[in-house]
Amino acid sequence: MRLVLLGPPGAGKGTLANNLKDALRILHISTGDILREEMKNNTNLGKEAKQYLDKGELVPDEVVTRLIENKLSRDSIIEKGFMLDGFPRTETQAKDLDRILNKFKKPLNYVLYMESTLPVIIQRLTGRRVCRNCGALFHIINLPPKKEGVCDACSGELYQRSDDNEQTIKTRMKVYLKNTRPIIEYYQKQGKLKKLDADRDSQEVQLILMKLFNEDENFHQH
Ligand code: AP5
């Protein structure tokens, strides 16, 4: 199955992807995670990306599209199936993704649009903590670790992302509304969009999605 997770920052795309990975047995590809890894390793791409991420702005289309094209072209990922989280984010990226997949005659099956409201987004992002070692996601209130500042899975150190402050969250929301929201219509026209109320509890979101999938007569063919 080939999926895109679409939604505002903090809608829970990464959380849903982690929960779905085992159920669907497909690879989770997050452009945000890839860019942060490059930043951590201080590569040229990482240094370039940092200027945008720290301000909450988008990395140029050609940079992220090249990254995704390289990633998808490796190890038969397009044939095996994947879940894209954070890509596409502009209409140009959406068209480029279609172009890449059409070369393999493997178009997207679904685009999951995770709708969330601003107060929920701010609460989730300002309280998010991430494991520096394994990337596991926590929240100081919604999903607290057993021991403060320590990852339950690998005992790594938890940190707060540099773009998870109120000022940068506001910029990220503006960028989302201007650049990313319009692609909802692009996918609606293709008949691929499935809407989810992402303000709900993460288990509920997953259950609603699995119900939507099971009601879809094409789901078991993917
Ligand atoms: P990216 O890393 O993709 O950030 P984002 O889209 O802003 O999304 P987030 O990762 O912040 O949120 P999420 O929806 O995954 O929420 P999560 O599950 O973590 O991108 C970062 C930057 O990289 C961009 O600003 C840009 O600069 C650059 N970039 C990336 N892709 C790009 C592209 N294609 N083009 C150009 N630039 C690009 O959840 C958040 C918190 O809430 C967690 O603590 C979690 O525990 C909690 N939570 C989640 N769901 C629930 C729930 N249902 N109930 C209660 N708590 C929940």
Image (cartoon, helix red, strand yellow):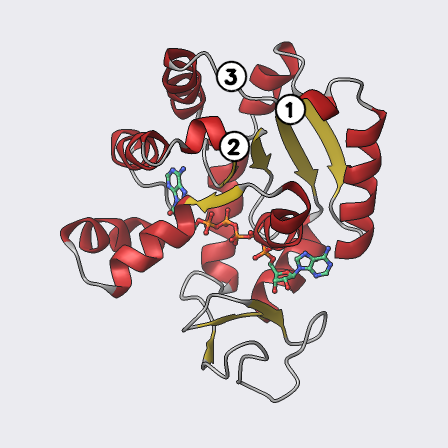
Residue 160 in sight here: yes
Residue 65 image point, x, y percent: 32, 30
Residue 12 in sight here: no
Q: Residues within 10 Å of mark 1 (few under 14, many from 20)?
A: few
| Residue 187's disc number | none
Query: 122 or 146: nearer the eye?
Result: 146
- Residue pictured at 65% horizontal, 41% vertical: 24
Q: Quadrant of the C terminus?
A: top right
Residue at image mark 1: 222
Q: CA distance from mark 1 to mark 3?
A: 11 Å
Residue 62 image point, x, y percent: 26, 29
* Local secondary structure at mark 2: loop
Depth check, mark 1 against mark 3: the one in front is 1
Residue 184 image point, x, y percent: 60, 24
**CB under 8 Å between discs 2 and 1:** yes
Residue at image mark 2: 81
Mark 2 or 1 closer to N-term?
2
Question: Hey, what amino acid is under mark 1?
Answer: His
Q: Residues within 10 Å of mark 3 (few under 14, many from 20)?
A: some
- Residue pictured at 41% horizontal, 73% vertical: 133
Which residue lies most toward the bottom here? 147
Residue at image mark 3: 107
Depth check, mark 2 against mark 3: the one in front is 2
Mark 2 or 3 closer to N-term?
2
